[in-house]
Amino acid sequence: MSIRNSTATHRGAFTEGSIHRHVFRLASVMIVGFLAMTLGQLVEIFYIGMVSSTALAAITFTFPIGMSLNAMTRGIGIGGSSLIAQAMGSGDREHAAHLASHCYLLVIVFTVSLSVSGQWLVPILFQSLGARDEVLLLTIDYFQIWLLGFPMMGIAMVSNGLIRSFGNAIVPGYIMTTGPVIQVCLGPVLIFGLMGAPELGLEGAAWTFVVSTTGQVLVAGYWFVIREQLLRLSLTSLWHSSYNILHVGIPAAATNLIQPASTGVVTWLLAGYGVSVVAGFGVASRIESVVGMVVIGISTSVVPLVGQNWGSHKFDRVHAALRTCYQACLIWGILAATIMWFGAEYFISLINDDPALVETAVTFLHIIPFSIGFMGLITVATHAFNALRKPGPALALSVTRLLVFYIPLALIADRYFGYVGIFAATALTNVIVGLVAVNWNKKVLASEQIRIMKDGLPT
């Protein structure tokens, strides 16, 4: 298949044709890409599990910090993608190219700044999460190397959303699968010292990440600069573009931070139960992410579909796209819960046989997957708010999820039911907030549609 998918030059590619087909095409490519990424991470966990349980615990402590950095970077990408989708929906590809170039510049400045400053903050961050002794030292060594690859990962991650907003559903799949292929092939060489390479252990996994993200950037840069010639070096209107991107990007980043904040709370609470329990959570969350990424893949079709059709004032198509995504998330949630319920113990046994680790991980996989479909509802709704350039409700929803529901429930459940209660609190929060998100999103869509039709205001 050609890397160059037909990109609409006058009107967004998703404003015509079957909504179901567009959702399937966008979601399937992203699901394959996300599955490749999560399977690559799962294989990495398998490699690290062969090193030691201590190494597994160390990499688990990096999850909330790494997820937080990713979340903030994705926020900038969401801000840019929503603008580009609406520009393509109105037929202005040249403006979309300038927006994309300015968005990349923002991402580069942001990620490089965090990569440099993070080198000195790493020990403080992981000590605050509860990492101690050998686990702390391993975590610091791993993450300081990981930060070197963070700017490349940020560029590649943002590229996925920008390219979809231009109407290309295929290339993001190439970008996303490049990294895992490198990760799976190069990982054991550097971790275990194969083929004459030094045995680096956990640090080898970090260097593999740096190389894999570099490969992803090369693929994205080829499409953006060479194939589509979308790079614009002009800084004219940079301030205006940056303002509009960050108008959605900053609240979107804050919204995205809720998930890693929740993970940070879980990791902090579990740290008191010992290394094996923390490691079990790390293994189980990676396995759960394999099935969970399906609903994330479904939700990524929202910004290009809703953005382009909203920009064209095709409101019926907007509602049809959201209904399709909501239904797909719930259906997959049922399938995912069934798979995890029956397969949990087998999946865990492939990685590590520490009894405490296995017990923790199996418990997690018997509880959390039942809420995956509802987690998908939250993600679809927040993407829809951002596509409408209404980031406030998405942020309010996410903050409410963390502060009003999750943290109080987790603290109470931890006290009375131990770590089992912590996992149950996560699942219950997803269900409650998922239902609230769908209803709130429907109300905002209806009010905005009435406003536009009545007043003729621009989107």
Image: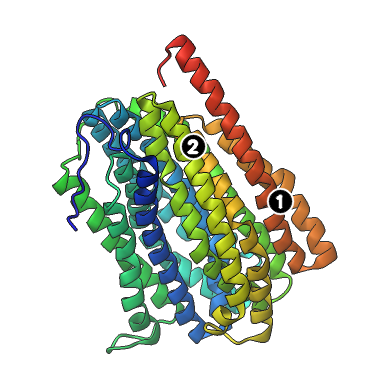
Picture quarter with the N terminus: bottom left
- The spot of residue 403 in percent (x, y) is 70, 45
At label 1, the amino acid type is Tyr
Q: Which residue appears farthest toward the top when viewing the image?
A: 455
Whether 389 is drawn above or below 116: the answer is above
In depth, the one of 348 and 229 nearer the eye is 348
Q: Are marks 2 and 1 in contact (CB under 8 Å)?
A: no
User: The residue tagged with tag 2: helix, strand or loop?
Assistant: helix
Residue 66 in sight here: no
Quarter of the image for residue 125 reads bottom right
Residue 344 in sight here: yes
At label 2, the amino acid type is Ala
Picture quarter with the C terminus: top left
Residue name at image x 58 percent, y 45 percent: 378
- The spot of residue 342 in percent (x, y) is 61, 75
The color scheme shown is: rainbow
Q: Which residue appears farthest toward the right when viewing the image?
A: 416
Judging by the rendered image, the residue that carries numbered circle 2 is: 384
For label 2, the crowd category at 10 Å Cα-Cα, with few meaning under 14, some 14 to 19 and many 20 or more, is: many
Judging by the rendered image, the residue that carries numbered circle 1 is: 406
- The spot of residue 225 in percent (x, y) is 18, 46
Residue name at image x 66 percent, y 39 percent: 436
Circle number at residue 379: none
Please tell me whether mark 2 or mark 1 is closer to you in this view: 2
Whether 395 is drawn above or below 212: the answer is above
Mark sitting earlier along the chain (2/1): 2
Left or right placement of residue 401 versus residue 390 in this view: right
For label 1, the crowd category at 10 Å Cα-Cα, with few meaning under 14, some 14 to 19 and many 20 or more, is: many
Whether 196 is drawn above or below 267: the answer is below
- The spot of residue 417 in percent (x, y) is 82, 66
Quote the CA–CA distance across marks 2 and 1: 23 Å
